[in-house]
Amino acid sequence: MNADEEKQVASDAAADVVHEGMRVGLGTGSTVACLLTSLARRALDVRYVATSLQTEVAARRLGLKVLPFDTFDELDVALDGADQIASNGWLMKGGGGAHLRERIVAGATRRFIVIADSSKLVSALRSPVPLELRAFGLQATLRQLGAVRLRAVGPSPDGGVIADYYGEIGEPDELARYLASVPGVAAHGLFAPTSVSERFVATGRTVARSNHGGMR
Ligand code: 5RP
């Protein structure tokens, strides 16, 4: 089974956590695109919030009801993909440049579920770490961070500059603390194990469900 098929298998399993009447956050990326298909098949009366225009457009095309995030102050569940899932539970996200909104949605939900194919499993996270930088003072932020390259993409929906940090990761919690302490960094792609309620990872037709970081 290839990675795309595994994404669909994991998405079908994860879509079952969504029930009638819920407020649901949707991440961004090719795994979430599979999830949208699984959710559309279930045809539930659910209100969705999207972390990118790409997800919003695709969800609406499938008939899902997407609302602006300022209409809720909490979500029941949010589902998203990841670029890497390390054996210590840390995640790398932001390959699609949506990590600021994904982090906001992950922080606003009662239950944050990560969906992935088996290619995302790694023994330890590898560089680069996606960043969203504030446009104001960009050159000063780049100088402060050092090993950063701007990504050849447009600004984020929130006016941020998408970039990648190529320095050593070392201990992810130390790097996450450092990146969060730089005023020009709006968001980074390191997600702590405790930020994730559950992971659905497909290997072939089998979906392993785990809650490495503990349930919230
Ligand atoms: C977007 C993300 C995605 O979840 C991550 O890049 C995985 O993408 P895909 O499902 O296409 O492999 O963090 O910012």
Image: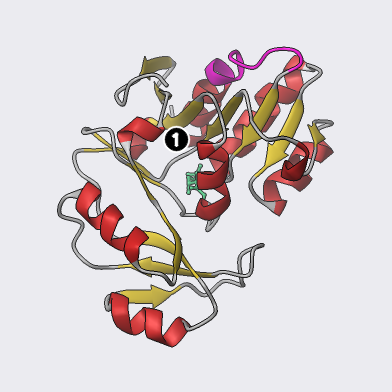
Asked whether residue 213 is in view, the answer is yes
Residue appearing at x 79%, y 17% in the figure: 43
Residue 16 spot, x, y in % from top left: 60, 13
Quadrant in which the C terminus appears = top left
Asked if the beta carbon under badge 1 is closer than 8 A to the nearest atom of ligand 1, the reply is no
Q: Eyeballing the image, is 144 above or below 34? A: below
Q: Is residue 106 left or right of residue 69?
A: left
Q: Eyeballing the image, is 73 above or below 162? A: above
In the image, the segment drawn in magenta is 12-21
Residue 133 spot, x, y in % from top left: 47, 70
The residue to which callout 1 is attached is 3
Residue appearing at x 57%, y 30% in the figure: 78
Asked whether residue 128 is in view, the answer is no
- At label 1, the amino acid type is Ala
Q: Nearer the viewer, residue 107 or 65?
A: 107
In which quarter of the view is residue 50 placed? Answer: top right
| Magenta segment includes 102 | no
